[in-house]
């Protein structure tokens, strides 16, 4: 411990969106403390980070990439864990995730402001991902310029609720929730969204001017995910289709299994081999290989991307799955559904194929085009890689976040 309540941390390796393949259960193993990632900065920012599902990955990436983005920044990480404390008596208030997240965020920020030998630690700016822990930070957000980051607005999440076991409450409660979120977004000095879809959702759903919102995708480590020239896209052997997703049904894995089995009976196509990275209970079979032991960001997982020919995620409900950016960074053509912000990375006929949700016939047709036309596969893969480099570079995007914080804090560049 170098000072009360903090730990001098060594940034971790950039994380993988494949944490979604564990359905966020890795959160239970990430009991992070409030920590300082640099110690000699000339300005200070707190990063309040939700620890659920793909947000765990985004949090880990920020912990790794923010310090090198600006050596003058002292970055304090405040992880907001999802788990309900086992010793607490169950009650409906504490079981509400927004309440629990907000109180934990406030507690973490109070720790940062404890007096030290040099006096009180002041924070020049805050970055809060997502709005869930931000809603109850009203007083802190009025005192400290704050950037709130989201992957989807609450209203957009409500539209996808059936796929996340998320039900709407009584009308009075939903109205109160709307007003609380609207005040949070209005109070923020600036907002960051993962996609243009979410940016427009803030405008259309909450009246937030678009010039107050920057689109900054979470991104991936392009160097790590880039595929070596001697792997994948082979002209002989089966065409390997890769799927990565823990919740097989919600991510459309069962539809993909059916589609690939039917394609296997088409004599004019090359052989198709489906590789599933999942924790779901699914049996391998002819042309179906199941990988259950691969962990996030592991060499074995990255190898699956590098040896694949097509990446397919026919999800029923999602915002912007990070696995699509990883596949694009690996130079893979993409097949997915036109839901949430997915069309911003899966661009029809350019980076791959978009299909309607739940339409197995359309899925078969999309895969048939890519499986049967190697030149088209390679073209879509090149375009996907170029898009990943332009919009999904985690290092470049972490620097954009730091620059945004510097602007709202009125800190001059070094």
Image: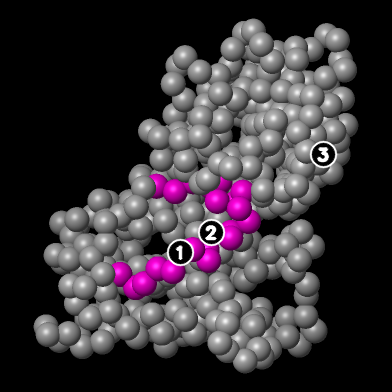
What count of labels does the image hold?
3
Instruction: Evaluate if marks 3 and 2 touch, with contact meaning CB atoms under 8 Å apart.
Output: no
Q: At x 56% / y 87%, what residue is drawn?
A: 87
What separation in Å lies between label 3 and label 2 (alpha carbons)?
A: 26 Å
Is 77 included in the stretch rendered in magenta? no
In the picture, residue 139 is in which quadrant?
bottom left
Residue at (53, 45) in percent of width and height: 295
**SS of the residue under disc 2:** helix
C-alpha distance separating marks 1 and 2: 7 Å
Residue range corresponding to the magenta coloring: 14-35
Q: Secondary structure at mark 3?
A: helix
Do the residues bearing badges 3 and 1 touch, measured as CB atoms within 8 Å?
Answer: no
Location of residue 409 in the rendering, given as x and y in whole percent from the top left corner? 29, 70
Label 2: how many residues lie within 10 Å, few (<14), some (14-19) or many (20+)? some
Q: Is residue 60 above or below residue 135?
A: above
User: In the image, is 396 to the left or to the right of 164?
Assistant: left
Whole-angstrom CA distance, mark 3 to mark 1, is: 33 Å
Q: Mark 3 or mark 1, which has the lower sequence index?
A: 1
Q: Which residue is mark 3?
A: 255
Residue at which label 2 appears:
26
The C terminus, quarter of image: bottom left
Q: Which residue is mark 1?
A: 30
């Amino acid at each position: 411990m170098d000072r009360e309540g903090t730990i001098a941390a060594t940034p971790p390796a950039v994380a993988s969106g494949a944490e979604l393949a564990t359905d966020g259960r890795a959160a239970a193993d990430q009991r992070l403390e409030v920590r300082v990632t640099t110690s000699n900065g000339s300005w200070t920012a707190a990063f309040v980070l939700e620890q659920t599902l793909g947000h765990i990955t985004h949090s880990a990436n920020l912990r790794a990439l923010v310090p090198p983005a600006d050596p003058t920044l002292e970055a304090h990480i405040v992880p907001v864990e999802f788990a309900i404390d086992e010793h607490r008596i169950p009650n409906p208030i504490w079981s509400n995730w927004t309440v629990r997240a907000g109180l934990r965020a406030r507690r973490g920020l109070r720790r940062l402001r404890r007096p030290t030998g040099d006096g009180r630690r002041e924070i020049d700016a805050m970055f809060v991902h997502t709005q869930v822990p931000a809603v109850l930070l009203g007083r802190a957000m009025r005192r400290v310029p704050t950037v709130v980051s989201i992957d989807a607005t609450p209203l957009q999440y409500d539209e996808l609720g059936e796929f996340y076991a998320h039900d709407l409450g009584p009308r009075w409660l939903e109205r109160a929730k709307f007003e609380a979120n609207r005040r949070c977004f209005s109070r923020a000095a600036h907002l960051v969204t993962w996609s243009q879809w979410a940016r427009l959702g803030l405008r259309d759903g909450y009246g937030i001017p678009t010039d107050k919102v920057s689109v900054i995708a979470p991104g991936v480590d392009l160097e790590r995910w880039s595929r070596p020239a001697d792997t994948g896209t082979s002209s002989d052997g089966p065409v390997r289709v890769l799927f990565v997703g823990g919740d097989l049904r919600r991510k459309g894995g069962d539809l993909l299994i059916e589609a690939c089995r039917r394609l296997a009976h088409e004599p004019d196509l090359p052989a198709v081999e489906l590789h599933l990275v999942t924790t779901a209970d699914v049996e391998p079979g002819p042309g179906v290989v199941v990988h259950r032991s691969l962990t996030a960001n592991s060499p074995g997982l990255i190898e699956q991307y590098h040896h694949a020919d097509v990446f397919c995620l026919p999800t029923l409900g999602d915002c912007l799955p990070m696995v699509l950016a990883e596949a694009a960074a690996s130079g893979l053509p993409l097949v997915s559904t036109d839901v949430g912000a997915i069309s911003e990375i899966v661009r029809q006929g350019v980076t791959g194929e978009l299909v309607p949700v739940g339409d197995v016939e359309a899925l078969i047709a999309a895969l048939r085009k890519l499986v049967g036309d190697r030149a088209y596969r390679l073209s879509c893969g090149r375009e996907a890689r170029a898009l990943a480099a332009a919009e999904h570079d985690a290092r470049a995007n972490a620097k954009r976040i730091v620059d945004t914080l510097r602007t709202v804090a009125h800190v001059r560049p070094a």
